[in-house]
Each structure stands twice: as structure tokens, then as C-alpha cells.
Image (spheres, rainbow, N blue to C red):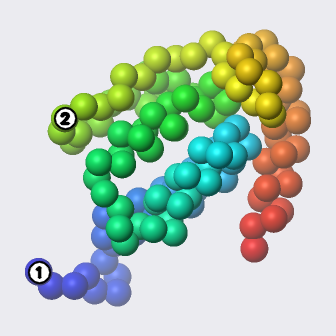
């Protein structure tokens, strides 16, 4: 197969761009998840294995509450073959070292999350 021209977008380009847009928001919710996904989708993309996709989706799904999105908003990819992680909307999750933080706590802590997100974005060069 011929190499893509300079103006052609590849699946690899699309995935890296998606990761660069999504991951900074994830860092506010789950720093360990951010580091794992950054490593597998950006730093080590050349050795990316499709089998990792299920783990990536699971990591994203467990952070939907913090990202303020739902399973229904995201939907299920029709192109996936094999097992796709079952999405369940959570009512609680871990944040800032506290386990099982409720949605009510998240609503009250949105200012803190926003401040942390601003700080993270300021660190990006």
C-alpha cells in the first residue's frame, strides 16, 4: 500500500488527535488512568495493539461521571468486533484520593475540578 500523502489523514493521526484532545480532561479525574492512556496512545503508539482498546474504553468509561458524560451520550461503536466493555453509568467514583465520591459532591466540587483543569492546561507547552 502506498504511504499517505502530506494532506491525507490516517487512522493513526485521528487516534492521536483524539487522545490529545481527550486526555487532558481525563487527567483532572484520574491521573493514573491519564498516564496509562497517554503512554499507550501517544508515546508507544507505534506498538499499539488493538487488544488494548478494551482497556482504553474501560478506563474512559469509569471516568464518565467526572467528565460529565453518560453511556447513552457516547453509545457503542458498531465497528467493534468481539467484546466491547459494558458501559454502566456510575453514581460515584474516586477523586483526589477519596473513594466513592457521590454526584452531589462532584457538583459541589466542580470549581475545584475546573481550577485543576486550568492549572493542567497552563502546564502544557
Q: Quadrant of residue 103?
A: top right
Q: Is residue 57 visible?
A: yes
Q: In which quarter of the image is residue 6?
A: bottom left
Mark 2 → mark 1, Cα distance in angstroms: 27 Å
- Is 19 placed above or below 7 here? above
Dot 1: within a 10 Å radius of its alpha carbon, few (fewer than 14), some, or many (20 or more) residues?
few
Question: Where does the image place residue 16, in percent across and percent down from the top left?
Answer: 46, 64
Dot 2: within a 10 Å radius of its alpha carbon, few (fewer than 14), some, or many (20 or more) residues?
few
- Is 25 placed above or below 101 here? below
Numbered circles on residues, count: 2
Q: Which residue is drawn at 15% across and 85% down?
A: 2
Going from N to C along the chain, the mark reached first, 2 or 1, is 1
| Direction left: furthest residue | 1
Closer to us: 75 or 7: 75
User: Quick one: quadrant of the C terminus?
Assistant: bottom right
- SS for dot 1: loop
Q: Which residue is drawn at 65% across and 46% down?
A: 32
Q: Is residue 73 left or right of residue 36?
A: left
Q: Mark 1 points at which residue?
A: 1
User: Quick one: quadrant of the N terminus?
Assistant: bottom left
Q: Residue at x 18, y 39 (%)?
A: 81
- Is 6 placed above or below 51 here? below
Question: Where does the image place residue 19, in percent across and percent down from the top left?
Answer: 51, 56
Question: Where does the image place residue 100, in percent across and percent down from the top left?
Answer: 71, 16
Numbered label attached to residue 82: 2
Amino acid at each position: 500500500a502506498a504511504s499517505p500523502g502530506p494532506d491525507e489523514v490516517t487512522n493513526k493521526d485521528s487516534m492521536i488527535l483524539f487522545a490529545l484532545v481527550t486526555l487532558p480532561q481525563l487527567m483532572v479525574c484520574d491521573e493514573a488512568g491519564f498516564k496509562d492512556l497517554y503512554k499507550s496512545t501517544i508515546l508507544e503508539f507505534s506498538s499499539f495493539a488493538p487488544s488494548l482498546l478494551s482497556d482504553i474504553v474501560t478506563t474512559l468509561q469509569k471516568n464518565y461521571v467526572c467528565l460529565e458524560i453518560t453511556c447513552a451520550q457516547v453509545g457503542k461503536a458498531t465497528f467493534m468486533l468481539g467484546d466491547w466493555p459494558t458501559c454502566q453509568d456510575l453514581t460515584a467514583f474516586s477523586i483526589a484520593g477519596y473513594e466513592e465520591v457521590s454526584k452531589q459532591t462532584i457538583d459541589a466540587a466542580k470549581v475545584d475540578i475546573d481550577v485543576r483543569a486550568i492549572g493542567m492546561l497552563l502546564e502544557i507547552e
